Image: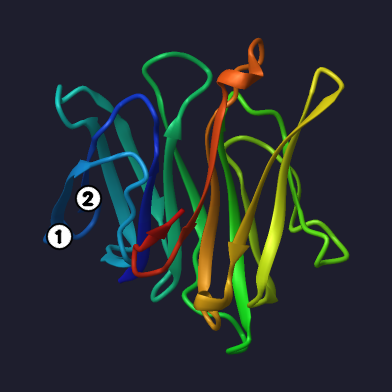
Amino acid sequence: MAHMQFINNDLWFDPLSVAMAGTVDSTMDTTLSDFGYLGATPFLEVPLQLMLIVKEDCSGYEFGQFTFDLEENDHYLIMFATDTAGYGGILTILSDGETSASSPTMVSVNAFHGVLYGPPLDITTPELPVPIVDDLSYGEFSGYNEVPALAYPLDFSFELYGETISFNGDVDLGPYAGSANVIMASGWLDTYMPYYSYVGVYMIHPDGRLKI
């Protein structure tokens, strides 16, 4: 078996229903029902040959069937996000997962760009000499990077029509010392009227806890 954490960043089809089954061994048949926006599970055991059937929970509309070949005992993340290519689609984005950092004084962070219609994203802080995230596109994970478990003033910035649009906030990583987490920028960016935009920053722990 492998281990997978499910996270929902889809803004439009809320909530989702996610059926899980093995493509070879069909003895496992589990469904996540009423899986709403910003929902997250802990790491769940899943078959190595995994099939996901993703639907809109209220209507039963099926977005598709997605198959994955996983490695024994490895950890993975699955992110559901709105497909910007056209109405009616869901992205299922796979990333390697982790549950702990290499040291009890560090935090392992995997950033995800989930701001709908947002151009590439940078995440910086004056506390570190290099960006935490540099030029991350919508629907992408950065991969895990380790940083000291401190409180950081973070700046999430987009370059839009030659102007920098920033969303500032403090993120305290102290409570997450020794663990691995997803830091997710989520929301939408209105390219014509930026003041109608909304961007939130969320920390997602391996046990499924979400903190704004």
Q: Residues within 10 Å of mark 2 (few under 14, many from 20)?
A: many
Residue assigned mark 1: 28
Distance from disc 2 to disc 1, alpha carbons, whole Å, reads 8 Å
- Residue kind at label 1, given as amino acid type: Met
Q: Residue at x 74, y 58 (%)?
A: 132
Q: Residues within 10 Å of mark 1 (few under 14, many from 20)?
A: few
Indicate the secondary structure of the residue bearing disc 2: strand
Residue farthest to the top, as pictured: 192
* Mark 2 / mark 1, whichever is N-terminal: 2
Residue assigned mark 2: 20
Location of residue 47 with respect to 162 vertically, above or below: below
Looking at the picture, tell me which residue is in the foreground, 104 or 93: 104
Q: Residue at x 41, y 56 (%)?
A: 69
- Residue kind at label 2, given as amino acid type: Met
Residue 71 in which image quadrant: bottom left
Where residue 15 sits in the image (x, y, percent)? 24, 34
Where residue 205 sits in the image (x, y, percent)? 43, 66
Q: Disc 2, disc 1: CB below 8 Å?
A: yes
Q: Is residue 106 left or right of residue 88?
A: right
Where residue 169 sits in the image (x, y, percent)? 64, 51
Q: Is residue 101 left or right of residue 134?
A: left
Q: Residue at x 71, y 58 (%)?
A: 153
Indicate the secondary structure of the residue bearing disc 1: loop
Q: The N terminus lies in which quarter of the figure?
A: bottom left
Disc sitting over residue 14 in the figure: none
Looking at the picture, tell me which residue is in the foreground, 156 or 184: 156
Looking at the picture, tell me which residue is in the foreground, 174 or 40: 174
